[in-house]
Amino acid sequence: MKYAYQFKVRTNIYFGIGINYALFAYNNIYVHRNKFSNPNLSNDTVRLKFQSSSILLRGNANFEIEKNLILYIGLGIGKRTQNVSNASVSYIDSLGKYIVEVGKSIDNPMPIGFETTLGCNYYFFKNLGAYWEVGLAKSMIQMGIIFRF
């Protein structure tokens, strides 16, 4: 999810603020029977979660190609937080005992966020359009809806 606000400083130069949030979660449940020690079914649940949020000051250089098409290159710097966690929980050991294991959580040791993007805005209507970006940002490829006020 991305929210951005920018204002025109000069003919092609815009400054603003960008607020970004990303979440990726993965759950997988393995159901198996341990033939050697316990004939009962047991479940192994593996969880992986990645969260990242940032608030960045951004600068863009815009180049109007057509009335509705604007290409831009942008740089941003600010604060970024990230967390990656994993867990392997809920299984039955060889004695039939229910075991819960808690995994690890790792935070980003460097809270500085940076991004550089190359993108384009295409306006379908006067104030409504779409954007596409590639670069080193929250994601390598981003796209979404834009509004112009």
Image (cartoon, rainbow, N blue to C red):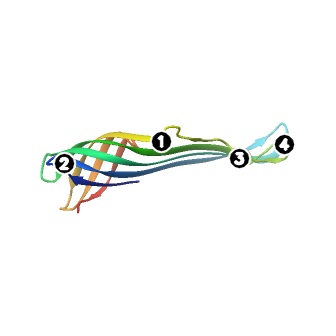
Q: Where, quadrant-wise, is the N terminus in this rendering?
A: bottom left
Give the mark, 4 or 2, whose residue is nearer the N terminus. Answer: 4
Q: How far apart are marks 4 and 2 (CA)?
A: 64 Å
Q: Distance between the residues labelled 3 and 4?
A: 18 Å
Query: Circle 2 sits in a helix, a strand or a loop, which is it?
Result: strand
Q: Is residue 11 left or right of residue 101?
A: left
Point 84% across, 47% down: residue: 97
Q: In this figure, which residue is indicated by the disc labeled 1?
A: 111
Residue 30 lies, in percent from the top left, at: 67, 45
Q: Distance between the residues labelled 2 and 3?
A: 50 Å
Which kind of residue does numbered mark 3 sit on?
Val
Picture coordinates of residue 88 (x, y %)?
68, 43
Report how far apart the C-alphas of labels 1 and 2 lie in the structure.
Answer: 32 Å
Q: Name the residue under label 3.
A: 89
- First in residue order: circle 2 vs circle 3: 2
Residue 83 pos. (x, y %): 54, 44
User: Which of disc 1 and disc 4 is earlier in sequence?
Assistant: 4
Quadrant location of the C terminus? bottom left
State the residue position of label 4. 38
Could you say which is closer to the camera, residue 7 or residue 132? 7
Task: Residue at 79% x, 40% y: name it.
Answer: 34
Classify 10 Å Cα crowding around label 2: few (below 14), some (14-19), many (20 and above): some
Q: Mark 2 points at which residue?
A: 70
Q: Which amino acid does label 4 sit on?
A: Asn
Residue located 44% across and 51% down the image: 21
Whole-number angstrom distance, CA of label 1 to CA of label 3: 30 Å
Q: Is mark 3 on a helix, strand or loop?
A: strand
Asked which quadrant contains residue 136, the reply is top left
Mark nearest the camera among 2 and 3 is 2
